[in-house]
Image: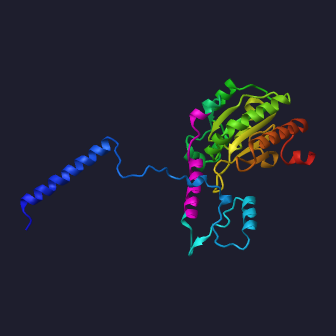
Amino acid sequence: MISDELIKKVVEQVIIKMEEAKADVSTNKVTDTPSEEIFDITEQDLSSIYNVPDPKNREAIMNLKKATPARVGIWHSGPRYLTSSALRFQADHAAAQDAVFNEVPESFVQQMHMFEVKTKCSNKDEYLTRPDLGRKLSDDALSVIKEKCVKNPQVQIVISDGQSSSACVSNCRDIIPVLTKGLEDQGVRLGTTFFVRYGRVGVMGQIAEVINADVVVLLIGERPGLVTSESMSAYMAYKPMQGMSEANRTVVSNIHKAGTPIVEAGAHIVDLVMLMLEKKTSGTALLKLI
């Protein structure tokens, strides 16, 4: 039999240890914990990682990896992926989900010196489930655009989050100056650049009708994947209108640091816009005239 006195001593010791632990937490004391930074697995360049042991032609495989973002040469452990490959897959998938569901920060819009409007979508969930509402501006948005935008511009630049908030934040700070400088150097009369939250490509038609723009350039986040969550597209159209066919739009896609570089994309967009203004058309009709 354990005596009451022994039980009392054990309880007292436990209480003392608990109080000491609370004191350590309250003073942010951490003991016996190595001060090592957690390695960010997404910083690894997949084109440089090749896990197949003893390959017959490593050089050929590495050249292939540089030519494609596909996950080549990740190897396996029995019937499963290597742990490192599985973790990288999960990390890239998480980044894609964040790009879709996260909001473009209001601070980003302010730093870009733009005003913001919304489509008829009230939140991200409605944006994802009601594409039709993402193609129409809210009543408040229409009023703000009429009040703040230059009327009858030759070119109106618009930014929208689309399906990747990450794409806007990662690319627009760099590409907007390239576009505005390039077009201004060509003597183009620009409109007032602004941001549309919860926008779809079709919203450019209503914007053009409200301000009577000749060409609208819509920079919008692309649907993210496992290769990148930061890819952006530039949709352009001459005299766009609501319900316009996709065939009447011109697009430059895959704009990001590992895809089409900002400077190259910006120069190409400027050239296309100048052709649209000259030929007074866009999309497949423009291709026939080039």
Asked if the stretch drawn in magenta spans residue 228, the answer is no
Q: Camera-side residue: 4 or 79?
A: 4
Q: Is 258 placed above or below 271 here?
A: below
Q: Residue at x 36, y 52 (%)?
A: 32
In the rendered image, which quarter contains the N terminus? bottom left
Q: Quadrant of residue 215?
A: top right
In the rendered image, the quadrant that contains the C terminus is top right
67 or 199: nearer the eye? 67
Q: Is residue 21 above or below residue 192?
A: below
| Position of residue 198 measured from the top left corner of the image (x, y, whole percent) | 62, 41
- 56 left or right of 117? right
Q: Position of residue 28 (x, y in %)?
A: 35, 42
- 97 drawn magenta: yes
In this view of the protein, can residue 213 be seen by the observer?
Answer: no
Colouring scheme applied when the structure was drawn: rainbow
Evaluate whether residue 41 shows in this view.
Answer: yes
Give residue 185's quadrant in the image: top right
Give the dominant element type of the magenta stretch: helix, strand or loop.
helix
Q: Where is residue 246 in the image (x, y as percent from the top left)?
A: 78, 48
Q: Residue at x 27, y 48 (%)?
A: 21
Task: Please state the extent of the stretch shown in magenta in the rendering.
Answer: 84-108
The part of the image, by quadrant, that contains residue 83 is: bottom right
Residue 91 position in % (x across, y down): 56, 56
In the image, residue 83 above or below residue 252? below
